[in-house]
Amino acid sequence: MQEKHLSQKVLVGGMVISMFLWGLSWPSGKALTHYCSAINFSVYRYIIVVATFFPLLFFTKTKVKITRAGIPAVIASGTLLALYSYFFYKGLKTGAAGAGGVLVTTLNPIVSYLIGIILSKTPPSKNETIGLLLGLVAGSLLLKIWSNPGSVFASGNVYFLLASVSWAAMSKITSRGHLYGASLGFTFWQYLITLVCMLPLADAQEARNVIHIHDPIFWGNLFFGAAIITSLATTLYFYTTTRLGAEKASSFIFLVPFAAAFSSWLFLGEKVMLHTIIGGALGMVAVYIINKRKPVIIVEPD
């Protein structure tokens, strides 16, 4: 019992760190949209992600083999991750990054819970309902929705809505990845399929020109986004979904808008408003309420 409790505490701590790293992905990703297209950027990123996964798998001695029954699941999750990546960066390039970022991170856990309710036909608990409602209030405050409600759906923010649905559906599939083999092995194949899906759509000429970019801002943010945000933070998120479930894990995403606002203030000099502080605090409370009941820790098969 003590081991399970400790495991949960470690997972929760790791998820909090991962969500703040995800918050950094918004200003980092916005900086990269000035250098390349959405498709090509995703290709560059996942080439680095797949490459960094080899030493990770080697040192953890993880088996990459998955069962035959897991092949459709890993293909579906990789394809959905490719769609999410495209919608995410397309939205950053054409829409309002701040409003879109809050929109995605607020809707992700809500959509994930809705999918879970539909599939399981089980209504949410009282704590989960309160937490989700608080998350909606937090997102509304962070968006300052009362001043310009139409801005949420303006321009490229439609891409962020599509990204949110893609992520929620992908999380549901990934949460069952442990049933088909090692969690890290499943995630490796997921990333590889994401790369394979996007590679044929890349602009070859643009890819050839990227080697002539000498700006450290480009290379620094590219490697940070791939090696730290995706290989480390996102992989931990996928790993945690197999333990806590997609709904519980997705609830931590309510922390991302606050982290994004803080990192934008720290690195871009954007002013942090009172409604952002209140909204971020409510998002943290929402995470606490949703996760108040301890989930069952699932043991990973050898």
Image (tube, rainbow, N blue to C red):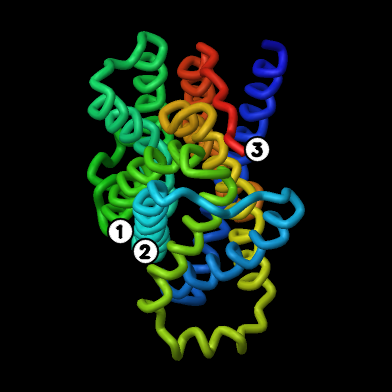
Badge 1 is on which residue?
156
Disc number placed over residue 167 in the picture, else none: none
Residue 84: percent from the left, percent from the top?
38, 55
Residue sitting at x 41%, y 56%: 78
Disc with the residue nearer the chain's start (3 vs 1): 3
- The answer to whether 79 is drawn above or below residue 198 in the figure is above
Could one spot residue 230 in this view of the protein?
yes
Residue sitting at x 25%, y 39%: 149
Asked if disc 2 and disc 1 are in contact, CB closer than 8 Å, the reply is: yes
Quarter of the rendering containing residue 117: top left
Disc with the residue nearer the chain's start (2 vs 1): 2
Disc with the residue nearer the chain's start (2 vs 3): 3
Q: Which image quarter holds the N terminus?
A: top right
Asked if disc 3 and disc 1 are in contact, CB closer than 8 Å, the reply is: no
Disc number placed over residue 17 in the picture, else none: 3
- The answer to whether 19 is drawn above or below residue 94 in the figure is above
Q: Secondary structure at mark 2?
A: helix
Residue 197: percent from the left, percent from the top?
38, 68
Kindly report which numbered mark, 3 or 1, lies closer to the viewer in this rendering.
3
Q: Identity of the amino acid at label 2?
A: Lys
Q: Which image quarter holds the C terminus?
A: top right
Q: Identity of the amino acid at label 3?
A: Ile
Residue sitting at x 28%, y 29%: 114
Q: Identity of the amino acid at label 1?
A: Gly
Crowd class of label 1 (few under 14; some 14 to 19; many from 20; radius 10 Å): many
Q: Secondary structure at mark 1?
A: loop
Residue sitting at x 59%, y 48%: 184
Residue 256: percent from the left, percent from the top?
52, 39
Could one spot residue 23 in this view of the protein?
no
